[in-house]
Image (spheres, rainbow, N blue to C red):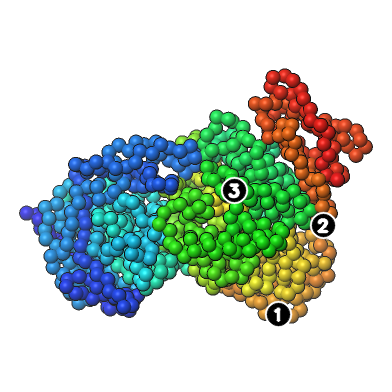
Amino acid sequence: MSDIINVFFRYLVVASVLLQLVSCGKNEGSAGFTVRDEKIVISSGDQEYIFSPKFTVLYRADDPKLAMRKSGIDGVSYNVITWLTHEGEKGDLADIERDESQAGDGFDPSVLDAKKENRTPNFYKSGQYIIQEASEVLERGDSVVFQFEEHDLFALKASVTYSDNGYPLLGYSLIPKVAGYFSVGYSGAPTFNVDKVEEIWQPLIWQEKRFPTSSYMTLALRCPIPTTMVNDGQNTIGVLAAPEEFPFDPLPLVDNSRFGIVLRDFDGKAKPQLFAPVLGGQESQMKPGDVFSFSSYLLVEQQSITGTYEKIARQFFDFRDYRHNEFASLNETFENIVEYSKSDYSRYVDSLKGFAYSTDVPGAVKNVSSLNPLEIALVTDDQEVFDTKAYPMMEYMMSREKFLFSLDPEQKIQHPSRKLTGPIAPISELVALYNIFGQSNDFLAELAKTELTKARVRNLDVAETGENWMNYMHLYSATGDKQHIDKAVEGAKAYLERRVDKRQGDFKDPLSGGPFFWTGFTNRWIELTQLYEITKDEAFLNAARDGARHYAMFIWMSPRIPDTNILVNEGGKAPLYWYLRSKGHEQMYYPEERVEAWRLSEIGLTPESSGTSNGHRAIFMANYAPWMLRLGYYTNDVFLKEIAKSAIIGRYRNFPGYHINTARTTAYEKEDYPYHEHKELSVNSFHYNHIMPMASMLLDYLVTDVFVRSKGAIHFPAEYIEGYAYLRNKFYGAKEGEFYGEKGVQLWMPRKLLTVDNVELNYITARKDGKLYIAFTNQSSQAEQAQVTLNPEYVEKTSFTGKIWKDNVDEGVFSASGSFDVEVSPDGITAIVIDGVELKKGFQQSVLASTKEIKNSYKELAFGNTRAMVFNLGEYAQSAYIYLQDDDSVWSRVSLTYKDADGGEKTISDQDYPFEFTIPLDRSKLEFRVEGKSINGPVSKSEWEILGE
């Protein structure tokens, strides 16, 4: 009897809580509700949507063994949550063999190698499926209470209440009568035929009209916002987990996901549904008399899905311009990363001309682009970076077959290559190199045109076709040929009709680059932004914004950041990433500390990819940020601009590794964090080939931030760094720009040119004819002041005059000595031009100096399938690069003999593959021949060849 009394008492408590979840009062929100025929009716515009008092409960007595498995979804690498099938059901999980690319960091062998067993990814097959529809709906003041018939397994209570934010708040409680595993879901939202709707969304991969082929569930940890959505052409409908149900700490993981969302209903139609707890997950195992309660909001928004996404992010999860430079300016971080790239800890392998890729593929090296180190060398005036990284990586990009290079012929992880059948450089990179060096290396432009007719696999196993509108656009930047831009525009307009104006129903977009990284799931919005910049055609701008808005739906907007301090590194131990622990990496130690939660937040970042999203929660490589910042300026889209800032600002002081995972920590913030041996790094993964691209990303953000805040008055033209996957940014430093009407200004940012005693101020610097140009941007919402000191190593004069602009208003004459004070308004910009100074001349000016073209600068020899070329590097240098495509299955030793300026012969031998030679030239002409000893013994030679004139 006492048990019955206790249960009855808990009923009363739950009912009271449900009726008082929030203060009542019919506040005006986006959609109020009424009750009609015992159903909730929400009106929006001229449409009404019926939300029935209907729930689905799943039950089973035994443990369903919740676990991630490979999905088997056609063409997509994606893991889904699965269960042991319930009694009487057959397993329907595809038994997929692990692809060789699915190995290394982010891929969990326990998922990939697990058998399908008797498993199902269909949530409705995971347990006994019980429909509960209210037998009575009672209006009580500003609330509506659902009453259900008693069930043998449980009691269910639910109500809908007006909330302060104007949205109907649905609360329910389940009280089991038997022991076992339970899951409860609201299943009364409107139902839609998917072929009749405008667009759907279920994170992470079902976007536009790509509808799930089974009733897959997305767990909380993979919900950028915790709802599915359907847009019927007029309104967007969803069921949203209340922010209080999604804890910030600990970091969301599979094991602590309190709910899951489903879009495909039992009958195969589109219906927003939310289930909590997840069957087999946290809190789902219950005993008689337990009480599980949960709350969610019923959404009807008269907006697109992307517009609704923003509204939810702002109104429910408090997304805003929330970050600032707490502990270091972005300039300090940028300079620290560049210095780190020059250290031995960056794992650059000189003999292979690439960064070690040992996190994923032991013994291999991988580069993203030669343009990243080249840009850094030019902008920071750093000859060392050019000599040791940029130029050798140019040779790598000309010769290698794939970005990932391994000498081990047995290595299969991520499909490396050991062939020298390049260029691996995409057309955009060949064109950029051609432009950067003053269009004095014609062979680069010719190779770019040749690549237009070819198809290549450059990264992983993704095939790329050369002839497309994007590559015609890139060729136009080199040639100025109107035919190229005409073909680009024609192709892009056809692309808009096929890809942008028509929502995608599958994962087979031919220009996507493959649905793995998020760039493969949206339109080519970055390239469309570039095409708009060339043509000013707003059709391309609108399409780019649409693509960026859809890309934003891969960006975390939840869980909501609490206004509290969080304890991290408890006991002095940093989190130990499970993947690196399995590889023998050691625990790292950082002081236990309490910090404001916003510093630890992933809000503004994305998971890495569809295939690694459950392991790589939030990656620091946010290359989309400068593009969104720029696109937000072009379209006056504040959401895109604020996402950009949230992705970059106040996150790290040096190279932070790859991702946030495992647990919240401040390890990434430490300046010395990357300065450890490889096996001593264990908080997150280190992909050393990302160091230079991250520096380019930050430089792009610095320059773009100034461009946006100056409203285009400070502008530097750029080339394009395509790289691969999402590693795309603008390249600065080769072309002169404009500074408040003054043209011919050269971006110039040598290390420690300025000392600024306020970390909230970021800046860029430039030079021209005895003038130093500085633009400061304030990352804080308060006015900031700083003392600025010029480094006498670069600036010889200590007193000067000039001009100053504050928030783009000319404030007149500026005068100072070697140090001066500057004030920048909240989120504002202050720019200064210092006149009459003597600035140090360095590497930058010599490499950018114009020189005449070298003719006959490229040759292909039949002997050894040899390729030979001369790089004209301005007044800085000329260099010959010669390599054999034939490998060590043909030759045991290769020698190169060439004649010096006096006609004397010099010979260089290479006994180890790859067979390649670099010869600095004191003139543009090289006479050479190649000699090889075959593996069978005979020695043979090529004819004498002349390269250059």
Mark nearer the N terminus (2 vs 3): 3
Q: Residues within 10 Å of mark 2 (few under 14, many from 20)?
A: some
Mark nearer the N terminus (2 vs 1): 1
Residue at x 25% of width, y 47% of height: 126
Q: Which of marks 1 and 3 is in front?
A: 3
Apparent side of residue 935 relative to residue 281 in the rendered image (left or right) = right
Say which quadrant the C terminus sits in: top right
Q: Quadrant of residue 366?
A: top right
Q: In which quarter of the image is residue 632?
A: bottom right
Q: Do the residues labelled 1 and 3 touch (CB within 8 Å)?
A: no
Q: How far apart are marks 1 and 3 (CA)?
A: 40 Å
Q: Name the residue under label 2.
A: 850
Name the element at disc 3.
helix
| Residue type at the position of mark 3 | His
Please say if 80 is above or below 650.
above
Q: Mark 1 points at which residue?
A: 810
Q: Residues within 10 Å of mark 1 (few under 14, many from 20)?
A: some
Q: Which of 444 and 656 is in front in this view?
A: 444
Q: Nearer the viewer, residue 935 or 12?
A: 935
What label sits on residue 690 in the rendered view?
A: 3
Q: Is residue 460 visible?
A: yes
Q: Can residue 22 be seen in this view?
A: no
Apparent side of residue 942 relative to residue 398 in the rendered image (left or right) = right
Mark nearer the N terminus (1 vs 3): 3
Name the element at disc 2.
loop
Residue at x 69% of width, y 38% of height: 350
| Residue type at the position of mark 1 | Asp
Whole-percent x, y for residue 572 in the image: 48, 46
Whole-percent x, y for residue 28 in the image: 32, 79
| Residue type at the position of mark 2 | Ser
